[in-house]
Image (cartoon, coloured by chain):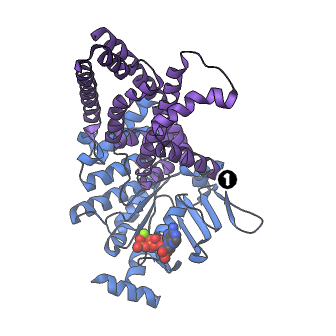
Amino acid sequence: MTNAEKHDARASRHQIPVPDASVSQILGLPAVYVKGARKSFSGREVLHDVSLSIARGEVVSVIGPSGAGKSTLLRCLTLLDTFDAGELYYGSLRVTERDENGRASYSKDASAKARMQFGIVFQNYNLFPHFTVMRNVCDAPIAVQGRDPAKVEAEAKQILERLGLAEHAEKVPNQLSGGQQQRVAIARALAMHPKVLYFDEATSALDPRLTADMRRIIRELAADGMAIGIVTHEMGFARDVSDRVAFLLDGRIVEEGPAEEVMENPTDARVREFLATAED
Amino acid sequence: MMGMLLSGYRISMIIFAVTLVGSIPLGMLVALGRLSKFKPLSLLMQLFISVLRGTPLMLQMFAVSFMPYYVFGLKTDANFPMIAVLISFVINYAAYFAEIYRSGIQSIPRGQYEAAEVLGYSSRQTFQRIVLPQVVKRVLPAMGNEVVTLVKDTSLAFSLGVLEMFTQARAIVTSQRTMAAFAVAALIYWVTCLIIEYIMRRIEKKLDYYHD
Ligand SMILES: Nc1ncnc2c1ncn2[C@@H]1O[C@H](COP(=O)(O)OP(=O)(O)OP(=O)(O)O)[C@@H](O)[C@H]1O
Ligand SMILES: [Mg+2]
């Protein structure tokens, strides 16, 4: 997708009136915003003062070499782990509070609310093997969000249709290929109506055709107004799909900006070096 | 002869059924206690499991049957041996089942918990909807073995004088001086085990709609 196309996608989105505009949209707040995040494991700091935001309709990739802290950042953003310090917002919802020692504290209530704002497609999908595709998609909206089963199922059918999974609705995950399972994981996340969707290594298991499909799906979701956060070390994909990329090196974001700009003319020497080795 | 054997069989099956009905859920509580983050509870359950699996069931039965007299100074009535058998069987099998459940629960990948957490499931929902159904499938073969063992273990009630099938068979053999009663009893135990194995296979088949 060229820049012009991306721009068109965004422009057309803005022409669509959004009836249920939330506070964060009105205020133009990013869908997710983290500032000054720190994280240590047994005394060794692996995230140093990381700040990042993703706007509605924006695709942001965090790239960097192995051990840079990408997974750690993603785990903390999805509340599977906690930042030691820093501020985390989902829209207007403040997730972390500062305690008297300046450390980040998480209330149960804010965390539960935040969980309804994001979804994640795990690297190995983590589908529920004993549920059919349909049940994988519908169970949480019904059991967790308490929504009407008939409506959830009708919507799930649409989502599966859109992701090309309609004929697989009654299969169980292990009857599907890896690429199909990944799309089920996307469907499962989408059924919860997240504002932010994260991908851990979105394409590591996909062949070139499926990678192209995944790019298209992600761009469509962004065009619908979703904020997309991707963690990957696949440079080509990150460049193709992202509006912005952030380079994470040794737990610091050393460079950040529009995808083409950062990947073609990085200012940081270590990024240049990393890109050069990643080419081949 | 058949009348005595069948009345014994009825008692054996009561021991069998009560043990399963009691120990299957009790074992789950013990397993959850064993896996609890609350250390004292976890250690206590570990001790419970270790002692009950590490000592003979026969000895446990005697311990339970003499407990009222030696510990509380109570006289027990004629029904008490059966009650002692049921109590000790339920507790003993709960310990075995708890270990099976524990390894089943621990074999569920962490990713399942993480997926559930991100989707907002409470820990109770995660256990009931995601973990338990998968644990059931994983523990079924091991449970099947224990259930078959239980059929044969019911004959241990003989040592407390409970009139289950083996006790009856022995009485017949002693009075009639023929081994026929033992042979018939053996056949009945064996057929019972075959039926149970068949039922277990049916359940396993039912859960065969997915692999993980
Ligand atoms: N639970 C943990 N306990 C201790 N150290 C950890 C833990 N998780 C991650 N680390 C360390 O934190 C650093 C960052 O790891 P992380 O997994 O976030 O890197 P990554 O960028 O995702 O790497 P990769 O591309 O290989 O997935 C590494 O040095 C790692 O060893
Ligand atoms: Mg990683």
Tell whether B14 sits left or right of B6.
Answer: right
x, y percentage for residue B107?
Answer: 40, 51
B72 relative to A67, above or below: above
SS at circle 1: loop
Image location of residue A172, percent across then percent down: 28, 42
- Residue placed most toward the observer, A51 or B110: B110
Q: Looking at the image, which residue sits at the far right?
A: A100
> Where does residue A226 sit, x and y in percent of width and height?
46, 55
Chain under numbered label 1: A
Quarter-of-image position of residue A156: top left
Residue B39, how many percent across, how many down? 62, 52
| Chain letter tied to blue | A
Vertical position of residue A6 compared to residue A259: above or below: above
Q: Quadrant of the N terminus of chain B?
A: top left
Q: Which chain is purple?
A: B
Extreme-top residue of the structure: B3
Q: Is residue A15 above or below residue B60?
A: below
Q: Viewer-proximal residue, A244 or B132?
A: B132
Q: At label 1, which amino acid type do we have?
A: Ser
Q: Is residue A144 left or right of residue B9?
A: right
Would residue B196 be visible to someone looking at this image?
yes
Q: Residues within 10 Å of mark 1 (few under 14, many from 20)?
A: few
Residue on which the image places disc 1: A107
Q: Residue at x 37, y 51 (%)?
A: A186
Task: Pick the residue in front: B70 or A60.
Answer: B70
Work out whether residue B177 or residue A60 is closer to the camera in this orientation and state it: B177
> Residue at coordinates 47% horizontally, 50% vertically from top-left?
B113
Residue A158 visible, this angle: no
Query: For the image shown, how many numbered marks are present on the structure?
Result: 1
